[in-house]
Image: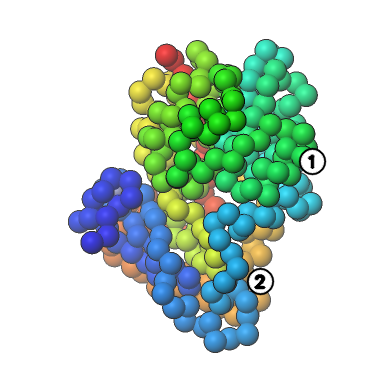
Amino acid sequence: MIKCCECNDSKNLGSIITYKRKWFMCNKCGAAFSAERAIYPLSMLPFPHLKKSKDLNEDNIYDYFASKEHEKVSRINYELFMRNFSSYINNLEHKNILDISGGSGHFLKNFKPFCNYALMTEINTKAVNFANDDLKLNAVRFDFNKDSLAKVFNENKIRQKFDYVFMVACSMFCLDMSKLISELKPYLNDNAVVILSGNVAPTTGVMIRTQFDDYSYLVLRQKEALKKYFQKDFSLLRESWYQDEYTEYVLAHDVGLLNSILKNFYAIKAVRKILKQFPNTAFSSFRLRDRHLYYQVFQYNK
Ligand SMILES: [Zn+2]
């Protein structure tokens, strides 16, 4: 029996089909999560993005993090991040920063000269090596779905506590937020600020936009649901919906006649189903937004 990966409920689930995966939506907690389809219907056609990829796995899928193009995206990301959050980031010379799922490190590199200590964690080995060797950052490999943070920190002799924790475009890949947050607490200084940005809300548009990706988000949470994980020991400083600024990436998925036919084919079917299964819910409002992002800023109070 399929159960919601967030609340374990099995009675209130609905689903839609996209090209490469089936998405389940929970009417109890509002989360959406996906399972890969056994067969991709047009994989006989000579287009790589319509076929199952044999060479990719959850580690090397992020190898592009070390690319030039990713450096550009990281720059845009950093500028937007500072516009939103610079008022929370001050007196850095005495502060320690932890960037969870920091990618290539291009993002954290911007802070390193100004802070006391900066550390990033990342699942992708190539990106960890790039951050350590090329960018001269402190980076450790950490898979929050499998590893224990304390074990990884002990093995790497990390004894610092942190004043800032950045989790940029990260929550959608973390299956157990309560585990991650409880593992994080022993490493937080009093009044530490935790910034979660680039959180993607579950919309049909997002599920359709990512339908050709070999790996996609593991879980999409509603804004209220993510906030609940921080109810204990944290206070909410600010939260908001916002727009990001790299639409080229989003639109690349619609280029070409075949892709746009497939997009519309799956979108029309999905939206019909959503309106029937989930009338008057977060799934039915904003349904065709292909990026629906929010951020939350918390302060640790213990
Ligand atoms: Zn649920």
Mark 1 in CB contact with mark 2 (< 8 angstroms): no
* Quadrant (top left/top right/bottom left/bottom right) for the C terminus: top left
Q: Is residue 76 visible?
A: no
Out of 214 and 169, give the one closest to the viewer: 214
Separation of residues labelled 1 and 2 (CA atoms): 34 Å
Label 2 Cα crowd, 10 Å radius (few <14 / some 14-19 / many 20+)? few
Q: Name the residue under label 1.
A: 134
**Where's residue 164, x and y in %?**
58, 23
Left or right of 95 in this view: 52: left
At 43% across and 29% down in the image, what residue appears? Answer: 183
At 72% across and 40% down in the image, what residue appears? Answer: 131
Q: Is residue 292 above or below residue 49?
A: above
The circle on residue 271 is none
Q: Residue furthest left?
A: 11
**Where's residue 298, x and y in %?**
48, 25
Q: Name the residue under label 2.
A: 255
Q: Is residue 114 above or below residue 141?
A: above
Q: Is mark 2 on a helix, strand or loop?
A: loop
